[in-house]
Amino acid sequence: MALNNGLPDNRNTMIVKWAKISSYRLKKIVQCFCEDLTATQAAHLLGLNRNTVNRYYRIFRERIAGYQEKNANIPATVEIDEHILNGLSIDASRKDNNKVPAFGIVKKDGKVFTQLIRNASKAHLIEIIEKINKGEITADFNNKLLAFDGIVLYGYRQFNINNPLKKCSGENIANHDGAENFWGYTKKRLLKFNGISSDEFYLHLKECEFRYNEKGKVPETLVAILK
């Protein structure tokens, strides 16, 4: 398998200050990452140890996450207050004691950004979403979840958020489409990893966000981030 050399001309001067391998090998690992090869595929192709590739892939993802957080200008996570959860009436058939990974999707200036949701079970989140979409909105909900265009319960389907504060129904529809398109892309991409640990999920989510927003510009933007 041949790698496409899609890196900008200044690729040889990037990130050598912290890299513990040669610039040539680092460039090849970056190329594999840009082409969205898994660490296993890249290690096999380059004749490197998979742990070595994984180490650099994690560095790339950590830098990407920081870049996305800065561009989004929103906190990495949002936490649902316990007093809000205690005020909800959860049907016994829908109770879920395990707090599942979930995230909100925001479309902003033509790009999509995500924010992890903490401290809420699947059942609680579904009821909050239903209340928002029925117009039963409080200041607490407004501050927490109303800003999202969609909410995804990881491993479950995406829920659209009908925000009455949007300028018009057309804006809601456009933002819902953006959220749905992003989740469709993310779901398909994450399948190839055959499962992701909860510790790694956030970095992979931010990588998906980055790739989705930087279509056609991933190599150039990544090299700029890694310097």
Image (spheres, rainbow, N blue to C red):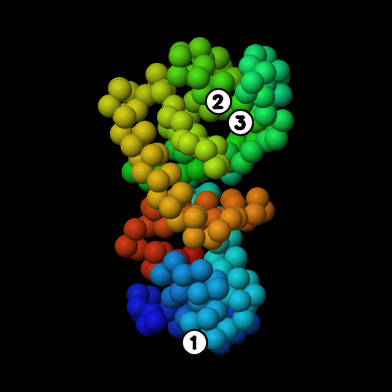
Residue 158 has which mark?
Answer: none
Q: Is residue 143 above or below residue 103?
A: above
Is 120 on the left or on the right of 208, as rendered?
right
Q: Which residue is mark 1?
A: 24
Q: Determine the residue positioned at 56% across, 17% down.
A: 139
Mark before the other along the chain sequence, 1 or 2: 1
Question: Which amino acid does the dot numbered 2 rest on?
Answer: Ile
Secondary structure beneath label 2? helix
Tag 3: amino acid: Lys
For marks 3 and 1, give the CA distance.
46 Å
Disc 3 target residue: 122
Q: Are marks 1 and 2 in contact (CB under 8 Å)?
A: no
Q: Residues at badges 2 and 3 in contact (C-beta under 8 Å)?
A: yes
Characterize the local packing of mark 1: few (<14), some (14-19) or many (20 or more) Cα atoms within 10 angstroms: few
Q: Residue at x 37, y 82 (%)?
A: 2
Q: Which residue is mark 2?
A: 126
Q: Residues within 10 Å of mark 3 (few under 14, many from 20)?
A: many
Tell me which label, 3 or 1, sits earlier in the chain: 1
Q: Mark 1, mark 2: which one is toward the viewer? A: 2
Give the x, y percent position of residue 123: 61, 26
Q: Give the amino acid type for the residue marked by disc 1 in the picture.
A: Tyr
> Residue 182 location, x and y as percent?
40, 45
Asked if residue 136 shows in the view, the reply is: yes
Q: Check disc 1 and report its element: helix, strand or loop.
A: helix
Q: Secondary structure at mark 3?
A: helix
Residue placed farthest to the front in the image? 93
